[in-house]
Image (spheres, helix red, strand yellow):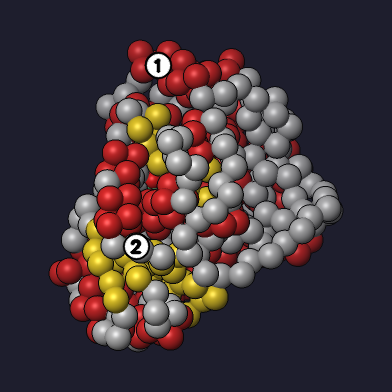
């Protein structure tokens, strides 16, 4: 196992009715900015629950954070933060709203005169940020209890990370996920699945705890994901609970502590979203199968473990077992109704040059657990994904 330091201070309030807990979590004298997205929270009752819980607090609102939140939208929050002397951010929404809140919280206290975009473009360290709380409405990203944020500006989708923007608390009420569309349910399950894979499918360092946690998360998502799409079981709260907790656990730092990680699928996927607007999770379901195929030799030992422990494949020689595990991964994605090829989203070979150019611009030239996924390897991956 590799050395690591691990701390996750986000307090989780899990379960039905837990939105009420925010009244205790946010200091009573705070000046709160409630930030949210395009309005789903107004039609599913979440907004009303939040407002009731904030009954005794002073709060203001900032809405309109879009999926794949944009720098231009987020910067508009700085006016209200200054004018109303905001000192606490409450994010209510999916990963985009929580990520957006993190950027807003860091931008609010960024050095005067400097453009907060430098936090992403130049990876300038965040030195101060407003405190953040989150009410999660879409299980997927893990953003509710990690320090990561992804922001887009002019087609450049970039990430930053800081413990200072990790939410102090997060409410996870599975009931609020009942209003999600099938597309968003699928996206969430697939995103969490790929987060787990990217911290698992590398090379072995004999991290038994991390491996078995990861295998448990993968099996849970494989079992429960399709049920959340099926008419008979879609409103089952146990299923939603298991999906929601899996998504949080997949990217709260626990399974990734002390093991190598390979975020190449995400980095290539971000370019697909930045250039063509493909949903985050749908970029991952397109890229991951090709990564597994192109990196078969480097990931051989873990692919065999994945085949045996996650898919219970025990027959056939090693190559056949690996191929079957990759095929079953693709079939799982198909069951989750997400694309597995560039051609499924009307893209093809002609689009690969632009994606490679963008990867180069963004410094994504040595990806993977061994930093050996060059631009040439990314090209091979994308070519195989056509
Ligand atoms: O904006 P509203 O009206 O709220 O609608 C949203 C949005 O249109 C809707 N939605 C959310 N909760 C709902 C709901 N609709 C009905 N009922 C509910 N309960 O869903 C749509 C998509 O929301 P979004 O927040 O964009 O989805 P997601 O949670 O998948 O977040 C994706 C973003 O997170 C980033 C992605 O790159 C992308 O920008 N990621 C963040 C990570 C992190 N912070 O650690 C890691 C991830 O890998 C990912 O990169
Ligand atoms: Zn993701």
Left or right: residue 330 versus residue 262 is left
Vertical relation: 363 (above or below) 145 = above
Residue at 49 percent of width and 34 percent of height = 118
Distance from disc 1 to disc 2, alpha carbons, whole Å, reads 43 Å
The C terminus, quarter of image: top left
The dot on residue 76 is: none
**Measuring 52% from the left and 50% from the top, which residue is drawn there?**
148
Q: Is residue 286 above or below residue 314?
A: above
Between 377 and 170, the one nearer to me in the picture: 170
Q: Quadrant of residue 83?
A: bottom left
Q: Residue 295 location in percent, x, y?
A: 65, 31
Tag 1 residue: 354
In depth, the one of 176 and 161 nearer the eye is 161
Could you say which is closer to the camera, residue 317 or residue 83? 83
* Residue 277 percent across, percent down from the top left: 30, 34
The answer to whether residue 279 is visible is no
**Residues packed near mark 1 inside 10 Å, few (<14), some (14 to 19) or many (20 plus):** few
Query: Which residue position is annotated with label 2?
Result: 85
Query: Residue most toward the left?
Result: 43
Left/right placement of residue 156 relative to residue 83 reads right
Contact between labelled residues 2 and 1, with CB atoms less than 8 Å apart: no
């Amino acid at each position: 196992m590799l050395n690591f330091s691990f701390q996750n201070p986000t307090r989780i309030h899990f379960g039905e009715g837990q939105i009420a807990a925010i009244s205790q979590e946010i200091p009573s004298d705070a000046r709160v900015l409630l930030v949210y997205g395009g309005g789903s929270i107004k039609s599913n009752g979440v907004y009303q629950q939040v407002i009731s819980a904030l009954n005794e607090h002073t709060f203001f609102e900032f809405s309109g954070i879009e999926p794949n939140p944009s720098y231009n939208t987020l910067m508009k929050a700085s006016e209200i933060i200054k004018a109303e002397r905001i000192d606490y951010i409450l994010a209510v929404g999916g990963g985009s709203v929580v990520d957006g809140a993190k950027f807003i919280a860091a931008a609010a206290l960024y050095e005067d005169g400097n453009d907060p975009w430098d936090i992403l473009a130049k990876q300038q360290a965040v030195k101060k940020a407003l405190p953040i709380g989150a009410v999660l409405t879409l299980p997927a990203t893990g953003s509710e209890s990690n320090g990561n944020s992804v922001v887009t500006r002019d087609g450049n989708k970039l990430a930053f990370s800081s413990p200072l923007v990790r939410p102090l608390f997060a409410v996870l009420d599975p009931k609020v996920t009942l209003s999600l569309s099938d597309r968003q349910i699928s996206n969430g399950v697939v995103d969490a699945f790929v987060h787990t894979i990217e911290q698992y499918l590398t090379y072995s360092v004999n991290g038994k705890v991390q491996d078995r946690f990861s295998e448990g998360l993968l099996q849970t998502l494989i079992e429960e994901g399709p049920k959340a799409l099926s008419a008979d079981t879609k409103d089952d709260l146990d299923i939603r609970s298991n999906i929601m907790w899996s998504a949080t656990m997949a990217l709260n730092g626990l399974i990734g502590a002390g093991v190598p990680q390979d975020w190449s699928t995400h980095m290539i996927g971000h370019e697909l979203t930045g250039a063509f607007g493909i949903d985050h999770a749908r970029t991952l379901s397109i890229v991951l199968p090709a990564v597994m195929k192109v990196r078969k030799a480097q990931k051989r030992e873990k692919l065999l473990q994945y085949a045996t422990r996650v898919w219970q494949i025990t027959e056939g020689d090693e190559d056949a077992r690996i191929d079957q595990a990759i095929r079953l991964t693709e079939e799982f994605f198909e069951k989750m109704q997400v694309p597995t090829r560039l051609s499924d989203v009307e893209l093809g070979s002609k689009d690969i040059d632009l994606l490679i150019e963008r990867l180069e611009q963004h410094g994504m030239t040595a990806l993977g657990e061994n930093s050996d996924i060059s631009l040439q390897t990314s090209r091979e991956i994308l070519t195989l994904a056509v």
